[in-house]
Amino acid sequence: MAKVTIATDWLAACAGCHMSLLDIDERLIPLLELVEFTSSPVTDLKHPPASGVIVGILTGAISNTHNIGVARRMRDRCKILVAVGDCAVFGGIVACRNLVGTETALRRAYLETESTVDGIIPDSPELGRPLPVVTGVADCISVDVFIPGCPPRADDLYFAIGELLAGRVPVVLPTQHFRYD
Ligand code: SF4
């Protein structure tokens, strides 16, 4: 039987959600009999293959124009898109920026911190432009499965992947797997 292909990518995120995926630990070994992780931030291949995958996992919020491009590419290249973690589900900690606004946050971070000397706000065509408002992934692309948590526990991710492998979409997370923190 052909393996289910899974690609992961991150937006405005820390590595916590991907670390949680790795925390599936020894259960990854039998899981790898059934799935193939084609690309992720922690593998050599970073971007989902152009030929597409079955499951695309995104962590992190939509914070800048680069994030929009990464999210759209994953949406284009996967059948089932899973938003993993509070940042991807509703903006999470990244969306705290919305409390003060992007300009104020940039000034504070790069010009005004007590340890900053001759600060400069980064401005390069290679960088994504910060958006006025941070959002979850679903404000940018359609999402099929939401798994909240900061990060979601490995058990939550393992359960959701098991449901997808069993062909159950939408995935309904039991309450013990559904939490915001
Ligand atoms: S949800 Fe938490 S662990 Fe996941 S990327 Fe956001 S801050 Fe990191």
Image: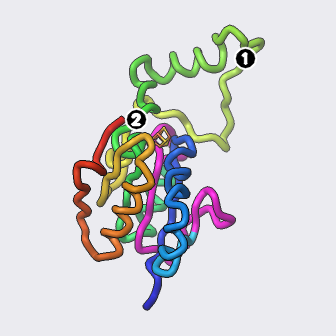
Give percent across and percent down for residue 100. Answer: 43, 17
Residue 92 is labelled as 2
Farthest residue in the bottom direction? 1
Q: What stretch is highlighted in magenta?
A: 39-67
* Disc 2 element: helix
Q: Can residue 121 be seen in this view?
A: yes
Mark 1, Cα crowd under 10 Å, few <14 / some 14-19 / many 20+, is few
Mark nearer the viewer, 2 or 1: 2
Q: Give the quarter of the image for residue 139.
A: top left
Q: What residue is pinned by disc 1?
A: 119
Q: Is residue 52 visible?
A: no
Q: Image point 41% across, 74% down: which residue? A: 54
Disc 2 marks which amino acid? Answer: Gly
Give percent across and percent down for residue 159. Answer: 35, 62
Q: In this view, does 34 lie above or below 95?
A: below
Queried on whether the Cβ of the residue with tag 2 lies below 8 angstroms from ligand 1, the answer reads yes
Would residue 148 appear left or right of 50 to someone viewing this image? left
Would residue 177 appear left or right of 92 to someone viewing this image? left
Would residue 75 appear left or right of 145 to someone viewing this image? right
| Distance from the alpha carbon under mark 2 to that under mark 1 | 27 Å
Mark 2, Cα crowd under 10 Å, few <14 / some 14-19 / many 20+, is many
Q: Image point 48% across, 74% down: which residue? A: 31
Compare marks 2 and 1 and give the one earlier in the sequence: 2
* Disc 1 element: loop
Q: Does the magenta stretch include residue 65?
A: yes
Q: Is residue 149 above or below residue 76?
A: above
Q: Image point 35% across, 46% down: which residue? A: 148
Give percent across and percent down for residue 160. Answer: 34, 62
Quadrant of image for the N terminus: bottom left
